[in-house]
Image (cartoon, grey):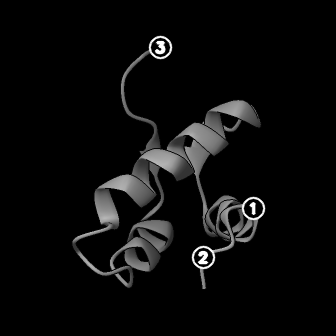
Amino acid sequence: MSGSIEWTPEAEAKLKEIPFFVRPAARKKIEKFAQETGASQITVEIYDQAKQKFGNS
């Protein structure tokens, strides 16, 4: 793997809405989801799909 996946500014802004103490775990989960779906960057759409998959509200 080539390290961390690129985030769009919009998706990055959504990530900042997550409480700081769970943010690193959420970022990892979302990046893993994006890689599994073959996405080259994390967009708001990918973010929302990952959030739905993991059942985070």
User: Are dots 1 and 3 in contact, CB under 8 Å?
Assistant: no
Q: Secondary structure at mark 2?
A: loop
Q: Which quadrant of the rendered structure holds the C terminus? A: bottom right
Q: Earlier in the sequence, mark 1 or mark 3?
A: 3
Q: Nearer the viewer, residue 9 or 36?
A: 36
Name the image quarter holding residue 23: bottom left
Name the image quarter holding residue 9: bottom left
Disc 1 residue crowd, few under 14, some 14–19, many 20+, Cα 10 Å:
few
Give coordinates of residue 4: x percent, y percent. 38, 33
Q: Residue at x 45, y 37 (%)?
A: 5
Q: Secondary structure at mark 3?
A: loop
Residue 1, disc: 3
Q: Amino acid at mark 2?
A: Asn
Give coordinates of residue 39: x percent, y percent. 69, 38
Left or right of 44, for residue 23 = left
Q: Nearer the viewer, residue 4 or 27?
A: 27
Q: CA distance from mark 2 to mark 1?
A: 8 Å
User: Are dots 2 and 1 in contact, CB under 8 Å?
Assistant: no
Residue 53, disc: 1
Q: Secondary structure at mark 1?
A: helix
Left or right of 48, for residue 2 = left
Name the image quarter holding residue 41: top right
Q: CA distance from mark 1 to mark 3?
A: 23 Å
Disc 3 residue crowd, few under 14, some 14–19, many 20+, Cα 10 Å:
few
Disc 2 residue crowd, few under 14, some 14–19, many 20+, Cα 10 Å:
few
